[in-house]
Every structure is written in structure tokens, then in C-alpha cells.
Image: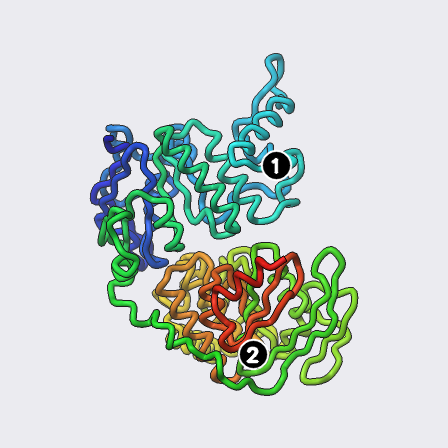
Amino acid sequence: MGEILKVTNLSKSFPGVKALTEIDFDLIKGEIHGLMGENGAGKSTLIKVITGLYVKDSGVINLNGRDVSFNSPNESVKNGISTVYQEINLIPMLSVAENIFLGRQPQGSRSSLIDWKTLIAGAEKAIRKLDMKIDVSLPLNSYSVAIQQMVSIARALDTSANVLILDEPTSSLDANEVEQLFKVMRALKDQGLSIIFITHFLDQVFDITDRITVLRNGRKVNVFETSKVSRLDLISSMLGKELKELETDLWDQKDSIAGEKYISLTNIKKAEYINEFSLDLHKGEVLGLAGLLGSGRSEISNIIYGIVKPDSGQIQIHGKDVKALNPRDAIARGMGFCPEDRKEDGIIPELSVRENIILAKQAKRGVFRYLSKKKRNEIANKYIKSLNIVTPSADQSVKNLSGGNQQKVILARWLAANPELLILDEPTRGIDIGAKIEIQKLIIELKNKGLAILFISSELEEVVRCSSRIAVLRDRSVIKELTGSDINEQTVMHTIAEA
């Protein structure tokens, strides 16, 4: 089979950043090609240049034997390239059907009005390709992030594409949804469709791809046949070094002694949100929440931080009853919260790195005790250095940083506010393995300094590695707590699976 897409000597720069340097990449007809590398390696930038979202500085893009240079993503779609970006790029208030046909709504034969019957039927057909059963007439935002991600994929597949680009499509999907997506991808491959699959999940890239291209620091460093490369060689290629940091004894903290109790939740319940549960969290420990998507992990973090008020139950902080919590109270009581969706709820994209870092500390001080410019600089520079945040300067807009560095900025924001409890909801989602290791090590360091940490991750291995205790959830219920030698992947999985 011949090349359907070939990129030669492609380069792209942004102010202060060389994002891509002389990249070569090829995609063969009827293959699934993995694209991997640390955040900031250039994966998303390469895709955005290919599809016309960014203009290349130099190099050649050849599609179906013809040199091309698209001026917009719509132009690339018309030429047979469909892309599902990591951030869901749909309109929440419109229906699922309208989102699937956005910009190409079917019209009646005798008018310019939308043919709703055809639109609904077409959307239902597109959704059925993913073996989903949802009401396509309902607004997109009435469904979970996972369903919204699948709708994005359904939209991309409904165009006449011969190249499909999936940028981290599985980050919000549970295991069953991932397997269903892979089933669709394999069927499309068998039909001759070529797929570029960007992911940070090692299991997934080995499960679904034929070849893997690795980028590092904006350069291509390797192309592997998936069946012939080891996990260690792939990871070493991504990082440019051996992975001694992955040795589990670095995180073997299961027998460490926790300090005083920071928060106690007793018989907490919220109808149609979370079933009754009780949890304690001490200073100097990491309490991990393990469970499948929708099991209630984020619901617990939202109640603790005061985003959602429970119907019943008792909350105590430092042994004293707390009648009602809201995020402002939570901050005043020493809590910090890194939310699941850093783009939507975490960073303030138009503000600088410095302004994002000092945000929580300034809010805690109040509007009438404004931090001086000198103090803001000191705080920002301290955490840029200590967390190894890769940025040209503290003045850089945070939206221009890689996902991993954006996550570090959010962590820096809360560390600057000197929290007693840090709630981390998916802090390593969608970031590269190098940044992931740094954040995992930071979690352990913060625990050892006496912070209480509530840690949520969809990656079971990560929860096991970092947690002092694990609360296992299923169907919005806390079903068991694990400690000591019971903290292992097998025990967690068996607990989740138990009837």
C-alpha cells in the first residue's frame, strides 16, 4: 500500500518557541499510525499545521500524491482529512444531531430551511456506527464528557474522509467505550481509511496501532513498527533517557504514618448524585479514589470543596462541624482544587503564567490586600523554577504552554496559597509521561511535607503508585477502603468487579 500523506522537512515557530523542526512523517493507506511524545513535543502542532489551523514556516505536505497547503480546517475536511481534537470543539447548547451536521445541514428540496427529518435520521445513523444509543435531539450538554467525545468522533466519521486524525480521543472514555472506539477504528482501517492516533496511553498504542512515530522537542526521533518495539524502548525514545524514575520503590510509601485528621465526612449523601459515604483524610497522606468512569470519584471531590452541597451528613474540619461549604469557604479553610477539566475550569487562558499562579493567593488575601509586583514576580519565579514549568517567561500567556506545563501552573497556583488539603482530580490526564512522572513525584513530596491530598485518576496503576490509602467506588458508592499490602491493581480490580 502506498503513502496517502507525506510530510517533508516541516517547520513551525511561535514567538519564543520553535515548535517543529524539519519534521518528516508518512501515513500509509489503511494503517493506524500512533503519534507519541511528551507534551510540548509537537504532536498537536504537527496536526494543526497539516489541517490548516496553523500556517507552516517551511516544508512540504503531500496528500494523495499532490502537494497541498490548507488555509483552514474546513479546507482540509473538503480534501478528505477529518480531525477530532483533544478539546471537544462542538456547541454545547445545540442538539447532538445539529452538532454532527454543523455547517452542512441538509436542506429541503423546495426551501432553504433545514430538513430536520433527514438531519435526525443521518445523526442516528452516524451514532449507530459507534454502537451508541442516545437521543440525538437532546442538547449536547445534557450528556457526559465521554458521550460528547464520541459525538465528536461520529461527526468526523460522517464526512467523506480518507484520513482520520484522533487527538487524544480516549482521555474521557471508560474501558468499554475505548474498546468500542477501537472496534470502529479497526473496521475503518479494513475499509481502507488511514488513521493518525495521538495518545499518551501505552496500552492503547500497543493495542491499536501498526506503526508509531515519536516526536521530542519538536523533532522526529524514531518510527517503530508496533509489533517490534518494547515498551521500555518506546518510553526511552520519548524521554531521551532511561526510565529509572519508574521503579516502583520511589513511590513505595504505603507504610508511612499519617498525621492529624484534617477532614472527616460522615454519612454524606446527595440524591441522584452520590450514595451515602463516610471518609476521613489526614495530613501527610494521599487518599486515592479508584473506580470506573461515573463511579462517583469527582462527585466526592465536588462535595468536599463545596461545589455541591450534600442533602445530609456531617462534615468536620480540624474536629469542628462545618454547616455549609462553598469554594470560597474551602479556600479560606486551607483547601486547593485542581479540577478535572483544566481548560474549562482550571487555567485562565488569556492571563499570563504569573497571573495564573498568584490567583488563589490573591483571592485568599482579599481584594484590598493586593500583592505587589515584586511579590507576584517572586512567587511566580519560585514555582516556575521548583516545578520546572517550561515557559519563555512568566509573562507568557498560559494558553501557549503545553498541557503538562498548564497543569503545573494550576498546581503552582494552589501551592502558592499554602494549602492544608490539595484535591487533585485527574492531574495527569492528557499529559506526557515525563510530566506525569514529575507530578507523581511532586505528590509524594507534598505528602511527605504534611499535606493532605485527595487524588483521583482514571489510570489505576497511577492511583496504586501514589496512594497511602485507596477508597474504591462503584456505581456512585464507596464500597471498600484498601490499605497496606492490599493496595495493588489486582485487589482494586477485584473489588470493583465484586457483585
In the rendering, at what x and y percent does residue 414 appear? 53, 73
Secondary structure of residue under mark 2: strand
Nearest-to-viewer mark from 1 and 2: 1
What residue sits 44% from the left and 76% below the top?
A: 377
What residue sits 53% from the left and 65% below the top?
A: 492
**Could you say which is closer to the camera, residue 486 or residue 317?**
486
Cα–Cα gap, marks 1 and 2: 41 Å
In the rendering, at what x and y percent does residue 289 appear? 57, 67
Please state which amino acid type lies under the numbered disc 2.
Answer: Ala
Q: Residue furthest top?
A: 110
**Could you say which is closer to the camera, residue 14 or residue 261?**
261
- Residue at numbered disc 1: 133
* 62 left or right of 99 in image: left
Image quadrant in which the N terminus is located: top left
In the rendering, at what x and y percent does residue 338 appear? 54, 66
What residue sits 45% from the left and 79% below the top?
A: 253
Please state which amino acid type lies under the numbered disc 1.
Answer: Lys
In the rendering, at what x and y percent does residue 247 appear? 34, 72
Q: Earlier in the sequence, mark 1 or mark 2?
A: 1
- Residue at numbered disc 2: 452
